[in-house]
Image (tube, rainbow, N blue to C red):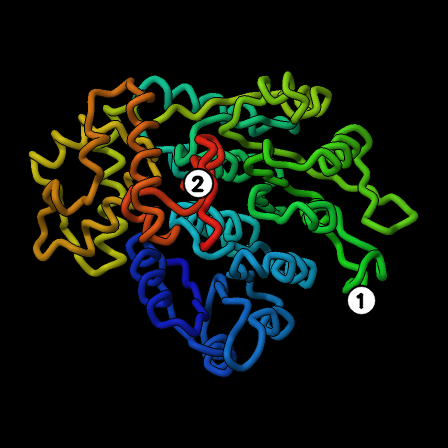
Amino acid sequence: MTRILLVDDEAAIRRGVRRFLEHQGFAVALAEDLASARRQASGGDFDLLLADLRLPDGEGTALIGEFPQLPTVIMTSYASVPSAVEAMKSGAIDYIAKPFDHDALLLTLRAALRSSEQSQERPASAPESAEDCGLIGQTSGITTLRKQIHRIAAADSTVLIRGESGTGKEVAARAIHTLSPRADRPFVPVNCASIPEGLVEAELFGHAQGAYTGAVKARAGLVESAHGGVLFLDEIGELAPAAQARLLRVLQEGEIRPVGANQARHVDVRLLAATHRDLEAMIEAGEFRADLYYRLRVLEIRIPPLRERMEDLPLLAGRFLDELGARFDKPGVVLSDEAVARMMQYSWPGNVRELKNALERAVVLSEGSRIDWEHLGLATSAAEPRGQPGSLNEYFRRFVLENQGRMNETQLAQALGISRKTLWERRQRENLPRPSHQ
């Protein structure tokens, strides 16, 4: 059995991740700081170290040099992603940003194990199919998607992944990486929408010392950090025009030039990009470069929305309930027949992400082992016949406008059964800016 040492100072994270990983067949030992991790790593036979970047008595990266034989994955907040990328240069195999999806965590750990000697001794721990990489379902749309991913994973071409918010575009990107010849090299995910416009170029391409106020030392960017591996640019449609031009040079010449630097640097990265936006319309409006679009769209896949593969819903729900039951120590939790019937009629505007969020809420709130419709907390106005996106948009607009004066963004997202990222994306599409007092 694969043994993992999990190091995190937050007890809730330690408990939740351990339950999930044990349910997946791993043996997990816990440590809350560097001192405890050192004691256990010195006396234990572990296959992988999963450590938080920030710990009470230092940085988790300190363990990399002390236990170089132990493959290491670093956990970090999105704000500290550059630091985690630096950790990869020090010997960490990969990093994952909090808050993370459990499927993403599992893919990251499996890829890390696959690249180590321990994983070669335990071939069962490596994913064998796209379904093992989180692409769950049996409908024609998802079956076709799995076949496409198997075919394109072996290539080294750029891929444009299209789909609505919450459909699982990053899961598909990680599946391509995990099944590709670059699986033992870094997978660097970047959400273009989350980087302030003024920092996009420095974050992606790095900067030279003194390039701007506060640049006290040179720093590599996220593109260079993916050297040899895969760079995943989520929400590519949000990339600023200047950054689009620089990215085009990376694709055409295989070179980057850090902000303020005189010399270009060679990089070898496979680029995967994803968007929910209509890039063709953006090109017509002058908001996206046509030459970059064609460079990105060498290969293209589409992730079907949940409403187009509703027959997969019971399978998805069963998988998520197994994971959530292990995470919250509620094994055997099931959906009532009424809940399943009403879920099959629900429109799922937030797609698979909304389904998973609703089930997590239900597992937490339900007192017994049965989940009823009311436990899911779904907006009843969205439980309309599928295929009416206009009415769903109207409901979203009305709900946000009526409640944003008394709810913050987190409360609004929870009430709608979507993530804050999805709420932000839908605000952009519906042209609903946040109130100035927020």
Q: Residue furthest right?
A: 262
**Residue 146 shows in this picture:** no
x and y, in percent, of residue 37 in the image: 48, 77
Q: How many marks?
A: 2
> Along the horizontal axis of the image, is 368 left or right of 264?
left
> Along the horizontal axis of the image, is 44 left or right of 15?
right
Give the Cα distance between marks 2 and 1. 43 Å
> Along the horizontal axis of the image, is 323 left or right of 66?
left
Local SS, label 1? loop
Kindly identify the residue that appears in the image at 23 percent across and 59 percent down: 328
For the residue pair 385 and 22, the one nearer the viewer reads as 385
x and y, in percent, of residue 365 in the image: 16, 55
For the residue pair 279 and 185, the one nearer the viewer reads as 279
Question: Is residue 347 depicted above or below 399 in this figure?
Answer: above
Give the residue number, with chain letter if any, for mark 1. Answer: 216
Q: Quadrant of residue 28?
A: bottom left
Give the residue number, with chain letter if any, for mark 2. Answer: 127
Name the image quarter holding the C terminus: bottom left
Question: Is residue 157 depicted above or below 15 in this figure?
Answer: above
x and y, in percent, of residue 406 in the image: 31, 53
Circles 2 and 1: CB distance less than 8 Å?
A: no
Kindly identify the residue that appears in the image at 88 percent across and 50 percent down: 261
Name the image quarter holding the N terminus: bottom left
x and y, in percent, of residue 318 in the image: 21, 40
Kind of residue sitting beneath label 1:
Val
Kindly identify the residue that appears in the image at 8 percent across and 55 percent down: 368
Local SS, label 2? loop
Kind of residue sitting beneath label 2:
Pro
The local crowd at label 2, few if under 14, some if 14 to 19, many if 20 or more residues have their Cα within 10 Å, is some
